Image: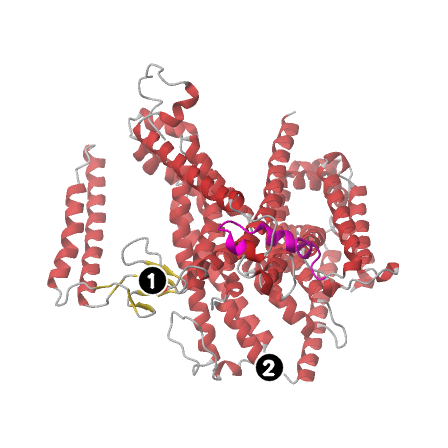
Amino acid sequence: MTPAAPARSRNFADLWNDAGVRKTVFQAALVACVAAVAFLLWWNASGNIARRGLEVGFAFLQRTANFAIGESVIPYSPADSYARALLAGLSNTVVVALFGCLLTTVFGVLFGVLRLSPNPFLSRLVGLYVEIGRNVPLLLQLFFWYSLCTRLSGPRQALSPLPGVFLSNRGLRLPSFVANDGLLLTVLGLAIASVVWLVLRRWAGHVQERTGQRPRILPWGLAALVLAPLAGSQLATSPIAIDVPELRGFNFVGGQEFSPEFVALLFGLVFYTTAFVTEIVRGGIQSVPKGQWEAARALGLPAQRIMRLVILPQAMRTIIPPLASQYINLTKNSSLAVAIGFPDLINISNTVINQTGQALEVIFIFMGSYLTLNLMISALMNRLNAAFAARER
Amino acid sequence: MTTTALSRPAPGRLPAGLKPLFSGWTNIAITAACTAITLWLAAKLYAWGWAEAVIHGDATACRAASGACWAFIADKFDFFVFGFIPEAAHWRVLFVLGLIAAMIAASLYRAFWGRTLLITWVVALVFAALFLQGDAFGLTPAPLRTWSGLVVTIWIAVVALATAYPLGLILALGRLSQMRAVRLLSIAWIELVRGVPLISILFLASIMVPLFLPEGIELEVLVRAQVGFTIFGSAYLAEIFRAGLQSVPKGQSEGAASLALTRWQALRLVVLPQALKAVIPAQVNTFIMIFKDTSLVLVIGVFDLLGTFKASLSDPAWLGFSTEAYVAGAVFYFAVCFGMSLYSRHLETKLSRDHQR
């Protein structure tokens, strides 16, 4: 490739402004070059694979994995196949990314609004956090949080910030609901109440458009929200049960357990990404022209409704695109789990590569998985963006 | 956010400077809470980091004290800077670090920006690589495999930028090209790299590159990591350059064409300077990102600064001082990254002022 380079770059200059034959020639040459390099790489790789006696193809996916995974969202045992192991890793990655995006959004919006507080003390404090969060490498932050998690005291002296919540060197224990029909019916009631509230809101909107008076729906909505789940729990045969973890012997029993690796990873990811999201939210709110505030005030709207009805919907247009790229970053960054030993997709892929030696295939699988995940996030956020886009008449 | 602007102006009981802090009960409560949190944090930090810290001493003194063990950092300081590089070559490490620092300092001044600086950078980097390895100059060899510590972090970041910058520019131009094959290849490269985590690119570089090379040729893991960073940085920079190129009005290249400049001249003399200037803040942000991400090389077995911090934690003489190591590392990375972002803000205001003039 190299000997042809100088001549080509001179041609490149002429071709830049010339349509026609030379363009085609240049493109053909480029494609030929890329194809030649690809062929060379493939040739070398196939030679190396043959020399090292490595296997090729995806047949290994069906073989028994024979290694244990610390934690997995989907059921997995060492007797399962490599495909199942990779799927377990993918499920862990998805769960971390999902929780991470959710928590990041909540805290990012909260801190973004606080960053704009008229109280300079508060906004500076949030600003300090943002600078620390953004300017320290995520990997270092993860190591730090993980070392804190593992240096916590044992279950017997566990920290308990809230009753039923225990933080120890075995990770985090939270109370959990027991899955029974009481829980099911209550959640169903909650869903029905939410639908009722939405319908009431639409109806109130229609009435307001017709008469100018907005009927009071808050008491009705609240009543539905309280009564429907209550009715659901009364109808069920078994009451809602909460499984509160308790110390028995040397460890906790009951409740939901989160490993120190998971806690450190999630906390680190949220701490890091929230700093970026805070700045995005702040920028978004500031991008709404001052006239919007003033016009809304002139209409007599109170501050909270100005924020909710006038400012935030407009700010969303500037917020959503960079927010989408932060979600993608968070998902990609969850791969740093490999450094603290959380069994995410990359970590398990690494084990699989070490056991089978089929690097090519495994790397193909995990890169494809990340690309698919990121495409899904962008597609979702594009739809959200379209929903908030300005509809001009 | 508040309705104060609308309400009747209250007779001025508070000085204007204190008003945002003490107007209304909510605000007073917020101020009080923030003061309490700040004071509590500051007191904790002072007690841990200074008052009860051990600055000189050994591990036993550290374990007896309740504060931080800065003696550990002091003891390991040489290791953080030089890593496993042979002792006879330490002065060369300092020289190379000094050279890079001087080059960066020179690059901060806009008066120096130009072709000479670019060529000097290339010469300085090639010289530094050969000089530090030592073979070419008949000095004690410090082979690439021994490179570690601070110098690796700086080296990877600087070389990644130096190589990713031109490659990113080519990719950006390719993506905006009217030739379909060029455009599609550029888009594929950019989107593929941006769509996967950096770790997977590093794995690709560390596991796959040996597989793709002909028999008998082996690359040091540091070089492979470097290749990964070049690929990674080029895709991110390409998107920024594309934004810059698209921000230059079409009239500029048309004007250049009407002056009988060729397209290549128009690009080099008219469009590119404006395009690169328009996206300086975004470029600096990418530099910061790449600098922070150099820490990931430790996953594929290169001992960068964070790697030496991590390695020093397993020294049996100094067990259990991970917090001190991570805090010290965080302070270093913070200082560099925050410095860069301050510089970017300074440039931004300066350039926008130039623009207004």
Viewer-nearest residue: B303 or B237 = B303
Span shown in magenta: B62-84
- Residue B123 percent across, percent down from the top left: 82, 50
For the stretch drawn in magenta, the main secondary structure is: helix
Which residue is drawn at the image coordinates 46% and 35% (left, top)?
A124
| Residue at figure coordinates x 22%, y 44% from the top left | A201
Percent coordinates x, y for residue A285 in the rendering: 43, 37
Quadrant (top left, top right, bottom left, bottom right) of the N terminus of chain B: top left
- Residue B130 vertical position relative to residue B10 in the rendered view, above or below: below
Q: Viewed as shown, does residue B70 lie left or right of A115? A: right
| Depth check, front residue: B228 or B251 | B228
Residue found farthest to the right: B138
Q: Residue at x 39, y 41 (%)?
A: A391
Does residue B321 belong to the magenta stretch? no
Give whichever of B352, A213 is nearer the camera: B352
Q: CA distance from mark 2 to mark 1?
A: 44 Å
Q: Which residue is mark 2?
A: A56
At mark 1, the secondary structure is: strand
Q: In the rendered structure, find residue A173 and report the number of the disc placed on it.
A: 1
